[in-house]
Image (cartoon, rainbow, N blue to C red):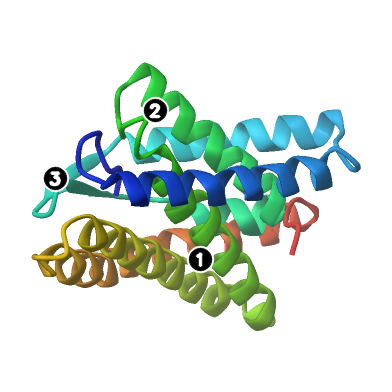
Amino acid sequence: MHIPDGVLSINVVVSTYAVLVGVAYAAFSKISRVWSSSLTGKTSSIAAVVFAAQMINWPIPGGTSLHFVGGALSGIMLGPWAGFTAMLTVLLVQALVFHDGGLTALGANAINMAVVAVFSGYVLYKVLKRSAWIAGFTSGWLSVFLAGTLCGIELWLSNPLSIAPLIVMALWHAALGVVEGAITASAIVYVKRKAPQLIEV
């Protein structure tokens, strides 16, 4: 799902960066009030797990790639604002150090994986949390599907003559969401059994 440089139009680049700056400001304002050493360690741990999982990816048609996202897991484990911070940290390191995702596309990549995936996964889990497995699976699936579809929309808006990237991204991430959902559900059920206090929802 990491969009490289040179794919997005200038309008999409500017608008996604503007949204990212706004969300980042809101996130840092909120978490600065409750930040602690324990939250720092927890956020760092989740970011490390997501970073490692996202390094396994494969390209698909449309100028992007398919991989585990971890947005829902981050939101459920950390809450939406710290989850956003963890995911943004991962995306920054990937873009700056490993050139996985372009700097011009960082706004779009962050909105897709650090905003949409995190917040949609968090909200849906909160609604369905009476069953950890169902809530984890559904939130993992939906977070990836929405993030992938939005990525496709960004690619389509950058090249309106071809709607193929939107279709490809939506279909592929609907399928990937099943894997993401299963991993998310398994992780949440395990943590809830062993250390339920670590779940922020």
**Residue 94 got which mark?**
2
Q: Which residue is mark 3?
A: 59
| 10 Å crowding of disc 2: few (<14), some (14-19), many (20+) | some
Q: Find the distance from the CA under tag 3 to the CA under tag 2.
A: 16 Å
- Kind of residue at disc 1: Ala
Q: Position of residue 68 (x, y in %)?
A: 35, 50
Q: Find the distance from the CA under tag 3 to the CA under tag 1.
A: 26 Å
Drawn side of residue 16 relative to residue 22, left or right = left
Residue at image position (32%, 58%) is 151
Tag 3 secondary structure: strand
Q: Say which of marks 3 and 1 sits in front.
A: 3
Q: Earlier in the sequence, mark 2 or mark 1?
A: 2
Residue at image position (16%, 72%) is 167
**Residue 185 got which mark?**
1
Q: Position of residue 124 (x, y in %)?
A: 59, 76
| 10 Å crowding of disc 1: few (<14), some (14-19), many (20+) | many
Q: Find the distance from the CA under tag 2 to the CA under tag 1.
A: 26 Å
Drawn side of residue 158 relative to residue 151, left or right = left
Tag 1 secondary structure: helix
